[in-house]
Image (tube, helix red, strand yellow):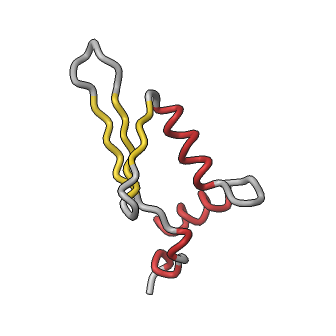
Amino acid sequence: MNELTKVCVSEYQSYLLRIWRPCSTVSWRIILEQIQTGERRVFTTVHELYRYLEEMTVSESGSVRQWEAEVQDLAL
């Protein structure tokens, strides 16, 4: 069993990210869909998307650093 399978289901989130631009004169379109619920969120900038993901992953202590370190360790 690898480390990813040990994660509590309630702490696991999977997303489908779509980013496209119909033509070079139009702004980028960003849609993030949560796989488990089908909920879709639309963002107008990558910064909005990042802020949302950061809010979703911040631990109760207010830090995502430990989570980022654990993900990097799993990638090795």
Query: Where is 36 relative to 18, above or below?
Result: below
Residue furthest to the left: 23
Quadrant placement of the N terminus: bottom left
Residue drawn 36% across and 60% down?
Answer: 35
Q: Is residue 50 left or right of residue 41?
A: right
Count of residue discs: 0
Q: Quadrant of residue 27?
A: top left
Foreground residue, 74 or 23?
23
Instruction: Locate residue 75, reporting x and y percent.
Output: 46, 65
Residue furthest to the right: 61
Instruction: Locate residue 21, reporting x and y percent.
Output: 27, 26
Residue drawn 59% across and 47% down?
Answer: 54
Residue furthest to the top: 25
Foreground residue, 73 or 46?
46
Query: Where is 8 relative to 72, above or below?
Result: below
Residue drawn 77% across and 58% down?
Answer: 61
Foreground residue, 45 or 66?
45
Residue drawn 42% across and 42% down?
Answer: 41
Instruction: Locate residue 37, reporting x and y percent.
Output: 40, 61
Query: Where is 68 relative to 9, above or below?
Result: above
Instruction: Locate residue 45, reporting x and y percent.
Output: 46, 28
